[in-house]
Amino acid sequence: MQTQTILFASRPKGEPTAAQFTFKTIDVPLPQQGQVLLKALYVSVDPYMRGRMNEGKSYVPPFEVGQPMEGGMVAEVVESQHPKLPVGSVVVGSLPWQEYSLSDGRGLQPIPADQAPLSYYLGLLGMPGITAYFGLLDICQPKAGETVVVSGAAGAVGIVVGQIAKIKGCRVIGIAGSDQKLAYLKELGFDETINYKTTPDIAQALAAAAPNGVDCYFDNVGGTISDAVYNLLNKHARIALCGQISNYNATEAPVGPRPEGKLLVTSSRLQGFIVSDYLPRWPEAMQQLSEWYQQGHLKYQETVTEGFDQLPAAFLGLFHGENTGKAVVKVAEPSSR
């Protein structure tokens, strides 16, 4: 059979464009012994994928020019020669950007089809939710009554961070880029919100929102927003360094205030982390996140784009703040429903 795939065409300089992607029709053979044929249902687009477009060593291998893009995907088994993955199974894993693909089953995790929307296994109950869980609870270790600041608060990770902080009894300040996003954060229980695009003085706004200083900072964006937060750190503050999306498309190393002095005088801890560091503990996070979701303590929003051909546009939209919550692309409905 034939299927469409999206190839990584060239490495970008600065912000990626549609020129980085090429569509191609390829043959997909039928599965042999130990293999399954998968139909893509939902595909995740994530900021970390920008780093994979660069050449050089990182925590995940770079995309290869001329080869298919790949990322998180929920897919359905439509033909099977695999003893543990029968037809009709729904799985999540890192897969090539193809409407149909072959797999030997390695790296695929079967997921229940009736406990939450399938796309949530790319967001709230997947990598972003798990990132929020460990970054906040393991690194920031928030205590009731403390002030938690979340940058990129309306993104896939940020909305979960803020809600977990509220579960733990904290005062939560969310920073996002539109009034619509701020309104949604208020619905989720955030105590204070700041629109970084329309606020003339971020440092002043943060100081007003956090009169007692900042105890925990979950950093998704870096840049001038983080510079402002560092000025408000309390003694023994904790910072989880999750992302730096404000710098991902920079062509030169950014120069700005250096945080070391602030960290020194406040005895604060700054720790970068990658969610795969916690891979052995993922089941713990998924179980707790699922419980909180079932109990109504966690709400989630997605920005769902329809159509396989819209994958590049959905990815590029991440760098312009077009998504609230998790950005996913819906490719197809499950055959079994």
Image (cartoon, grey):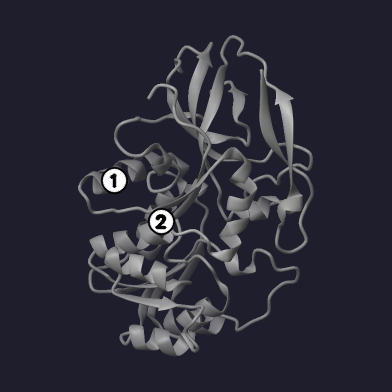
Q: Residue at x 58, y 75 (%)?
A: 223
List x then y, in percent, for residue 84. 45, 16
Is disc 1 surrounded by few (<14), some (14 to 19) or many (20+) residues within 10 Å? Answer: some
Q: Is residue 130 left or right of residue 192?
A: right
Distance CA(mark 1)–CA(mark 2):
12 Å
Q: Foreground residue, 193 or 239? A: 193
Residue 56 can be seen in this image: no
Q: Residue at x 49, y 82 (%)?
A: 198
Is disc 2 surrounded by few (<14), some (14 to 19) or many (20+) residues within 10 Å? Answer: many
For marks 1 and 2, the one nearer the N-term is 2
Against 33, is 313 above or below? Answer: below
Question: Quadrant location of the C terminus?
Answer: top left
Q: Which residue is mark 1?
A: 288
List x then y, in percent, for residue 312. 64, 48
Q: Which residue is mark 2?
A: 132
List x then y, in percent, for residue 202. 47, 85
